[in-house]
Amino acid sequence: MRGNGGRVFLTRMGLHNIRVNKTMSIASVLVLISCLMLMGLVFMAAINLNEMLAQFSSRNVIMVYLSDGVTEPERESLERQIMRLENVQGCIYISSEEAYEKIAAGQDFSVLDGIQKDFMPESFEVTPLSMAEFDETVAQLEGLGSTVQRVRHFQGVARQLSALERALTIVGAAVIGVLLVVSVFIISGTVRATMYSRQQEIKVMKSVGAAPSFIRWPFLVEGVALGVVGSLAAMGLVFVLYLALAQALEPLLSSLLTGFTLVPFGQYLKYLLPGFLGVGLLTGGGGSMFSITRYLKEKVYENSELEAA
Amino acid sequence: MIDFRDVTKEYPNGTVALRRVSLHIAPREFVFVVGASGAGKSTFLKLLLHEEIPTGGTIRVGRFELSSLKPRQIPLFRRQMGVVFQDFRLISSMDVYDNIAFAMRVVGAKEKAIRERVAYLLQLVGLSQKAQSNPSELSGGEQQRVAIARALANKPDLIIADEPTGNIDPRMSQELVELFMRLNEVGTTVVMVTHAHDLVRHYNKRVIILENGAVAADGGLKQAPPARPQAPPPTPRPPAQPLRVNTPPATPEDTFLQIWDNA
């Protein structure tokens, strides 16, 4: 006489519960969506910061810009001085025209309209031998005399990005942690509200000998369904938002780091989707189980008219 | 079927609800349990359903020794009994058919078995025409018949009825007890807790009177339950057990009526 009909019936019952508790169900899903969206955006921001850091690190060169009016002999003398420095591996001369071409390669040409090709200063691209003595080398280059107008490097930016990434991770983790706990409580509250309105059914189930796993099933279905809906909706929203942000931020990022573009979302879908579903299932399922434990202990006779003795 | 031996139940707040209660209810027996409020009837039922654990003594129901019952065995234990409540406990969002089917669905019965059994039960309780009705459209007596059908859904050997006539009119009450009698005649043990003295007087069945947590009287008013044509119970009670009381009786019936009037 036993079959899977019971599970099918109880699954339908769990899904029906969601419709009955519409307001609480929507609240649960919205909280979960906010939590997961934030999680997804922090994750993608961290990925992009990492990518930027990697690009900056690959560009561990020091740009030495020459003052206006430096003659060719002065320039050759400066190049020799640079090459004599202990921590210098290489030194490449970049003329004004070459600098212009480099910029033009990564930019919309209309931006450069009306600008002369020699508006960029001449420079040397200096490659240090060891990063450990990076700061000393920068100081030595800055002290090479009046032919050096300015020395520029990316270490400062890299350090700032690194600090930003750390801060983002810490703050993001804290906010996500709080939101996750809130999600668990909201979902468990939703399921508890369902259970309260279905006490009669739970008591009937217990009195006819339904196994605890059968009693739990509809509430687990309800929690898990809310979790899955929340995680899929959050995934879609993060995708849309990321595309919009990528479009808006691309020019700014590209100017900060020539040729830099945001990492493609699809590349990280394989991590984000299971992650989101996992969090949705855990908060939904966990929230349900958290609530039902109490109700499973409730007695068939509680609230009956025969409470006395 | 039911065996209480020296059963005591003391709640954590110090209330002693039952004191050294010993009683035996044989399979296929019909027993009324009566007593005033606070006499221990609810505790007796809770112990029967294994919702409470006795603080002393042992209880056996069917093949289950309740003191050694493991949590995973509780559902199996409860499937051997059907419970009928005073307040019907029907699910208002389901029609009559689904209320009865619900009891079978939640224990994993197949739909085909459910269809056949529910149709049979609806016929048994005389509600075949009301299968699609909502419980709120039924009279109290009809609702209680639905509850009885639900209690019978999983073919229990034992029916526990907790004040089943408490919320219905006297004529309908009699019809319900007749229904319990018919179930008893086909072999189901029935334990009915009630305050309806006239019903107990009308049906000459065994009566257990609880008073201050003890069995004050136990027996039949005029005669014991009639011998049944079906297979004899494994541990039969004496066929014409006289009323046993805790104080020497004038006549058994006088004593019963005296306790009864106080109950």
Image (spheres, coloured by chain):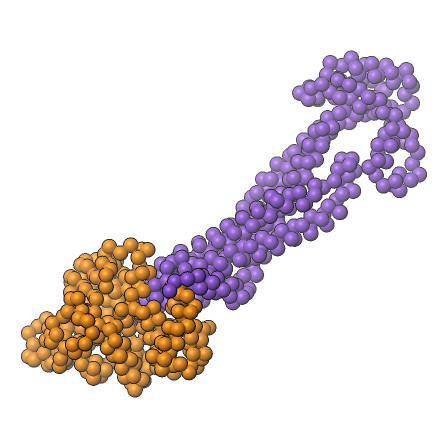
The answer to whether B122 is drawn above or below residue A237 in the figure is below
For residue B34, above or below residue A17? below
Chain letter for the purple part? A
Numbered-mark total? 0
Q: Measuring 54% from the left and 57% from the top, which residue is drawn there?
A: A226
Chain given the colour orange: B
Residue B90 in percent (x, y) is at 39, 73
Kindly identify the residue that appears in the image at 76 percent across and 35 percent down. Answer: A257
Does residue A100 lie above or below A218 as drawn? above
Query: In which image quadrant can residue A305 be found?
Result: bottom left
Give the image location of residue A254, x and y in percent. 77, 39
Residue at 84% over, 32% down: A102
Does A166 sit left or right of A194 as displayed?
right
Q: Is B47 or B233 nearer to us in this picture?
A: B233
**For residue A213, what is the image quadrant?**
bottom left
| Quadrant where the image shows the N terminus of chain B | bottom left
Please indicate whether residue B232 sits to the left or right of residue B169 in the image.
Answer: left
Is A171 on the left-hand or right-hand side of A92? left
Q: Is residue B27 left or right of residue A16?
A: left
Query: Residue A155: x, y in percent?
Result: 71, 28
Residue at image x 45%, y 67%? Answer: A197
Q: Nearer the viewer, residue A263 or B78?
A: B78
Quadrant showing the C terminus of chain B: bottom left
On screen, residue B36 above or below A121:
below
The answer, for residue A79, to whether it is visible in the render is yes
Q: Residue furthest bottom?
A: B171
Q: Position of residue B34 (x, y in %)?
A: 21, 75
Look at the image and tell me whether residue A191 can be seen: no
